């Protein structure tokens, strides 16, 4: 405990890290406050209890938006439209030559793609906002009669929802640029964590203490397993030929420097889960019925999408040919594998093999809430019992901790995860192999 307290003090000593954390917390606070600011003219008292929708996509949207969706706040659409737009742009990058060209233009191309993503986000919001107002807000009877037939009110509300979604995107981008962690993912995570105490209290009220203890124990085991798969790494042995002058170093030069190429089992991180969930939330905007998220078909489709997006995003994150070229240029090679094309093929086959079990495990974790409900766990708490909520929380928290860790290590302080088995930093052998 003393070591942890000392490490927390070290965070405050690093001025840049301290400023970034303060910016992060400030912007997150703004987002949380915004999720309770109700749209003008909406009677929030008629929206009902949040827990009543826990087993539907509407309830899940409320969870991912930190309550903004179920509160009918101006941040009700959250950042899911932006994520949907990002998915579309990345898919276009695989099929549209113009987008592929922008992807190859470096920083300038990235900025242009981001601008097109924002424009597409506005279009998606403009389509989703009327559906949200008519199907959810009006469906709950929360729109007064005098506004139901008012074009001015509908136009105003749609504009406010679109502006709120873009404001949420702006907050996420500012956190990424000026704060710590991935801002978009952090906003989702904070919204999820904010609902956890309420769900846990509801579970303790409705069950005996023994049942709650068992549920918490299983929950901890699931968290541990999720951390292991998220942090799992396959170390590929590598050799680097040393250039040594003189006969004395000839033997060492012949042997070279031994290091490792770390390939993560889940190289795509948390994005496949967010992407899959973003697609699964689309139907609620276009159909009046409530979709159950604990049903077999919903979970089968969700699991399939997670596996597909894991492969898709891994292909974007890992470029075997570029890795092989970099190794060859730096004098590195994998023992028993020829540099160049053969190395690229070896890495590609290895990534494919380790991605399959990783993606299947993520899919299993994603459907665990449906299993938990069958064993009597309450709907609200079951959303945290694995599923998208847990995967996002674990992935984002670990990524953020690793960023903080890097700041501390660069200032010659012990990291937050010093002495643990969590891979908060790379070993020296892995660093030399990058």
Image: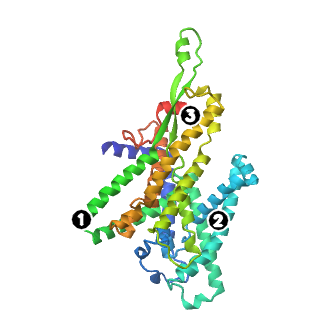
Q: Which residue is disc 2 drawn over?
A: 121
Vertical placement of residue 258 versus 295, above or below: above
Quadrant of residue 217 within the rendered picture: bottom left
- CA gap, disc 3 to disc 2? 36 Å
Q: Position of residue 26 (x, y in %)?
A: 49, 60
Image quarter where the C terminus lies is: top right
Callout 2 secondary element: helix
Q: For the residues carrying marks 2 and 1, which lies nearer the camera in this image?
A: 1
Q: Are marks 2 and 1 in contact (CB under 8 Å)?
A: no
Residue placed most toward the observer, 340 or 143: 340
In the image, what residue occupies the spot 41% across and 63% down?
A: 369
Q: Is residue 91 left or right of residue 137?
A: right
Q: Position of residue 431 (x, y in %)?
A: 52, 33
> Residue 434 — which label?
3
Q: Is residue 347 above or below residue 30?
A: above
Q: What kind of element bears circle 3?
A: loop
Mark 1 Cα-neighbour bin, 10 Å: few <14, some 14–19, many ≥20 = few
In this picture the colour scheme is: rainbow
Q: Residue at x 51, y 53 (%)?
A: 270
Disc marking residue 209: 1
> Do callouts 3 and 2 mark residues in contact (Cβ within 8 Å)?
no
Asked whether the viewer can see residue 152, the reply is yes
Q: Is residue 401 visible?
A: no
Q: Position of residue 177 (x, y in %)?
A: 58, 52
**Quarter the N terminus occupies:** top left
Q: Residues within 10 Å of mark 3 (few under 14, many from 20)?
A: few
- Label 3 or label 2, whichever comes before in sequence order: 2
């Amino acid at each position: 405990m003393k070591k942890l307290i000392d490490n927390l003090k070290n965070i405050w000593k690093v001025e840049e890290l301290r400023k970034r954390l303060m910016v992060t917390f400030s912007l997150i606070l703004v987002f949380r406050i915004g999720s309770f600011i109700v749209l003008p003219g909406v009677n929030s008292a008629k929206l009902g209890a949040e827990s009543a929708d826990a087993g539907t996509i509407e309830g899940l949207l409320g969870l991912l938006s930190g309550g903004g969706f179920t509160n009918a706040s101006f941040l009700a659409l959250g950042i899911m439209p932006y994520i949907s737009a990002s998915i579309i742009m990345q898919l276009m990058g695989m099929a549209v030559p113009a987008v592929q060209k922008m992807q190859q233009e470096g920083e300038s191309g990235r900025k242009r793609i981001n601008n097109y993503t924002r424009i597409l986000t506005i279009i998606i919001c403009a389509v989703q906002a009327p559906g949200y107002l008519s199907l959810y807000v009006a469906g709950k009877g929360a729109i007064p009669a005098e506004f139901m037939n008012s074009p001015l009110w509908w136009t105003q509300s749609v504009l406010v929802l679109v502006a709120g979604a873009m404001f949420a995107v702006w907050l996420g981008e500012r956190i990424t640029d000026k704060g710590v962690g991935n801002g978009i993912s952090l906003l989702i995570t904070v919204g999820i964590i904010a609902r956890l105490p309420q769900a846990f209290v509801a579970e303790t009220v409705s069950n005996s203490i023994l049942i709650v203890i068992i549920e918490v124990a299983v929950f901890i085991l699931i968290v541990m397993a999720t951390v292991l798969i998220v942090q799992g790494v396959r170390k590929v042995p590598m050799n680097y030929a040393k250039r040594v002058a003189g006969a004395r170093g000839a033997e060492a030069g012949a042997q070279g420097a031994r290091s490792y190429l770390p390939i993560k089992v889940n190289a795509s991180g948390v994005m496949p889960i967010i992407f899959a969930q973003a697609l699964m939330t689309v139907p609620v905007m276009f159909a009046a019925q409530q979709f159950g998220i604990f049903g077999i078909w919903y979970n089968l489709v969700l699991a399939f999408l997670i596996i597909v997006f894991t492969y898709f995003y891994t292909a974007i994150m890992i470029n075997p040919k570029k890795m092989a070229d970099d190794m060859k240029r730096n004098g590195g090679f994998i023992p028993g594998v020829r540099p160049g094309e053969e190395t690229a093929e070896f890495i590609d086959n290895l990534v494919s093999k380790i991605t399959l079990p990783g993606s299947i495990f993520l899919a299993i974790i994603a459907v665990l809430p449906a299993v938990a409900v069958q064993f009597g766990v309450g709907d609200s708490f079951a959303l945290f019992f694995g599923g998208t909520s847990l995967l996002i929380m674990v992935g984002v928290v670990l990524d953020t901790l690793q960023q903080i860790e890097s700041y501390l290590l660069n200032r010659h302080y012990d990291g937050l995860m010093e002495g643990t088995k969590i891979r908060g930093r790379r070993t020296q052998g892995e660093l030399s192999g990058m």
